[in-house]
Image (cartoon, rainbow, N blue to C red):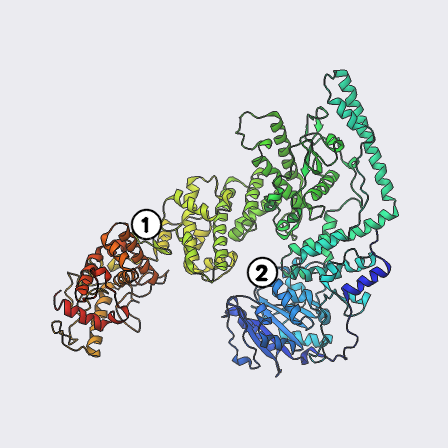
Amino acid sequence: MSGLTGAGAQQLNQRWKQYPHTNDPPVQRIPLTHARQFFAVDASGSTAGAIIGAEHDAVENLSFEHTNDQATTWGSYCQTPSRTFSDITWSGNLGGTNPTSILTHPPALDAIVHSDIWYLLTDGQVGGQEVWRLSSLAAEKGILDIPVVFLITGWTRGSPGSANVSVGVTFFANARDVLCLFKDVTSGVVYTLAGKGCFAPLQPDLDTPLSDQTWAQLKSFADEQELLAKCAEFGIMVTTAETRPDQTAGIDLGSEWDRAHGDHVTVDAGVLLSAGMLDDLDIRMLLADEAFNNLAMALKTRGSIAELRSFLLQQKVEQVAVRLEDVAGAAVILSRLSGPDLGRHEKELLQAQLRDAHAKNRHHYQNAIKDMAESSETSTARSRNRLVDRALQRLSEVESAGYTADILSRPSNRAMRAQRVEPYPHEYELSVVDLDLDAPSAFRSNCSICLGENEIMSIALKKCDNGEANTGDFALNFPLAAGYFENNRNMISAQCICFQCAMVGRPGTSIYGEEIVAVLPALQYTGLNKTYMDRQLYIAITGGLRTGTAGIAQLFMTVLDRTMHTKQWAGAGVQPGGHQDPEVKQRQALLDWFLTNILRHMQCRDTFNEQGNWSTYRRALQWAAGDFCVQRLTSWAIQYPTAGFMQLLRFGQKTRAFDEQDIRDLRATKVLHSITSLYLAKLYTSCKSSSKWKQPYLALIYTDFHADLVPKDLGANSSLLNSVPIFWAKLAGLLSLEPELLAQWVPTDQELIMRRVQVLLFWLVYHQKGHTTAKTLFAKLSEDQELAYAVLHTRADLPTNPASEILRSIFRNHEIGALEEFEEEKVQMKEIHMNGLCPFRTPFGPSVMHCGFAECPVSFLDGSGIDPDDVEQELTVQMVERLRRNRARHLTEVFGVEESFGRSQTVSGLPEPTISPSPPNSSHTNIHISIARTWGKLDDAQRRSVVNGGAYLDLFIRAVVEEVCKHGRGDIFQGDLDDTARRLLPSFWEVLQLAWREIESAGDHFAALKLDFAKDSKLDRKVKWERKVWGSQR
């Protein structure tokens, strides 16, 4: 019962308890204000602007009159530290937030090691994997013995507990001397969130978690210099780098642990977790509030929560469980009742005997419970197990807390508060006789076993395949979504018999031979009945781990509802009014009653978080509806995972907390949030790859494409995807993991959401370049986009024309006079060049001596000095340059549709890069050279096949269009690119034949001719070729 004792336990203590080195030289401690400091400043993209400025100010204040301090900036990578702070670039330009880059940069790591104290400044947050890597690196590099100040810079908008500490939690959890601060960008005020070790005097003196506090209740300082003055007042000292003892690799468990063991006794986590059963004294000290909180936090940052949970479960000792045994022969009576040819009188007599047997069994069970409660051995085991259970509960809270500042709060307050709200009535297993089996509010029906009429029925729960999934972070935060887990799908047995028969039947087995771990009576979910059922739910769903009654009830309600919707034996698939098997009907009625019963009576926080008051579930759902009306896309309901979100809607509808319009708005808004979250997640994982992954999103906006990411400009709204059924099918393909969300929409609602999704995706694809959260994105859109309110608020009117104009804004304006006032002559000239065809005059493109459009009389030779008929004339650089300028001037005039065209430093008049969402600044493309390049990539046989036409020609045209799109110059969106390419081919082949005839060794067909792009595509070479072949002929 009491684990290891004596010599064995002492040897084990020597293994997992790490004592300080006794031969270390004396340490020298100096005031914090005299310490040699190192500053690692977050300069990731999110700090650009006010935040990096506030961080810079903090460094200047903390290093005032220090001459030996060093600083560096970090983001995706870390810069080399410098003692000259004016040489550092104080701007948020270093990419993402990767604090591990500090410890992998040797000069930065060396600066930390040789400093007396170091500061980690940031505004951002990182994921769990980065926290684990940082924790591993910090231990590996041996820097956890160095005092560290973690300074978060941001705005005091939420509660102190909501501040994200993921970047610095590794050091707070694993290092000995840590101070966690928050600096408000607006006021410059510095707040203390937590302190330990030498910084313990600055620890906030709070009786409740940080999430229950206001910023005004925390210790605060006008600026960093006032903070340093307070440190001096408290006499805070740090050990110099030169005399700092070698670090032990263990975890520091805090001051109470130190008082019991002596200073600097740490715990080797690896050895501890494999140590097996500890003795009672060690367990009491290890699981004390402060010690266990430090241990749990440290192992959370190392990704070892699961291992710690397994260790704790090993520490429980087995208790003798008192079962409701059949000592009165109820099973024999049940067997006789099921016999054939039973007369009415005999049946009534047996039923009376069965009821008497049930009463005797309950009396025996009650006496056994009393005897067990008076046993001293049982009391010792129970005390140890209660301690382990409390630690397991705290571990679940630490696991589900994320990395907000509330995790820094003292551990026991939240658990004690929860215990006051959700008390367990006794230390031993709740007796069945405590259930109110005569309660008027119960589901009664006929029992197929005892043949009793009006009996209290029961639900039997099977063992979950993977109960640990129901105790993880996701399940604790989103119990409705956890109800959809595959391991919960078959939790409920089809057994439908009365509670008493279920309890005295074959132990642990249903009438169908299934393994049963819990049985729930169909009684009102209140009082002791609720407590008993909660205990049974814990056994079945979490393996006995108490994770909170509100969460376990929501998870089980979801399982009940899903069972009725997916299991034929529970009525799934039966049409209203259709024929239904009596047993199926009975099961369905039982499950529906149970669901309604729990929905009506369960208690939860009215804001679905620990800041709320306890209330009914319906009232909490009403709060969710109100929160949605105010917060919309950032509301609690919309941010709920989709599976649980759909369950939330069903429960809101069943309890009448949501009306029909609420449900329509919630679903529509969830679609906007889901597609945004999906896109941002893909943006994060694909940031270093090509952008082709964006094509499915653009396919929700535009009808047809030349190539990936290049939609066709088909004119007006014809370019846009306007078919609601096609749009919905494509949307369902993207949101394939959320089929329920898109099911059973009426066409009018689909049409209302279609343009909103399209405009939102347009903003995402063309304006969102880096990873961000959905919440931040929606806030930015609201500030930057005039139409954001109408797009993001589903009840607002979204004007059709402005929305369509946004989607078409990547295309050029086709009305020539719309962008600037042109003279009539210029308008006519532009129309000639936009509607005509410019044939090949050289193997690389149109004429370079005059405009190639038949109706255009402009020559590029004017003033150049080039004689078109003198093939012997030498071309000077000046001649060619004058020709180039003439051509550029003309091309700019006739093809330019935006003022920016032709304004580059090297004016050529050729198409310029088109960078969406800016529209093309000219109406032409580089289709001629694209045809030549594509032709040049083919071998002789492939070229002959293209000339012969058919499928090969179609493939060639497709390749030409893709070549145009790849280079992205000019109006690559114009809808007739493929037709233009096809119409240009005869002139291309004509010039190839002319060139082929001049070369005797070019083979038997012009398809064998090889083009020398590097040599012959230069302007002077093209002039010579054109002059030789065509002369002055137009």
State the image quarter where residue 120 is shown. bottom right
Question: Measured from the top left, where is residue 302 in percent x and y?
Answer: 65, 61
Secondary structure beneath dot 2 equals loop
The answer to whether marks 1 and 2 mark residues whose Cβ atoms lie closer than 8 Å is no
Number of numbered callouts drawn: 2
Q: Residue at x 28, y 70 (%)?
A: 1014
> Where does label 1 land, which residue?
717
Q: Residue at x 70, y 46 (%)?
A: 543
Secondary structure beneath dot 1 equals helix
Q: Real-space Cα distance between discs 1 and 2?
A: 43 Å
Residue 923 seen in this snapshot: no
Q: Residues within 10 Å of mark 2 (few under 14, many from 20)?
A: few
Q: Residues within 10 Å of mark 1 (few under 14, many from 20)?
A: some
Q: Seen in the image, is 186 located left or right of residue 329?
A: left
Q: Tell me the amino acid under the disc marked 2.
A: Gly
Question: Measured from the top left, where is residue 740 in percent x and y?
Answer: 51, 42
State the image quarter where residue 586 is shown. top right
> Where does label 2 land, which residue?
127
35 or 942: nearer the eye? Answer: 942
Q: Tell me the amino acid under the disc marked 1.
A: Asn
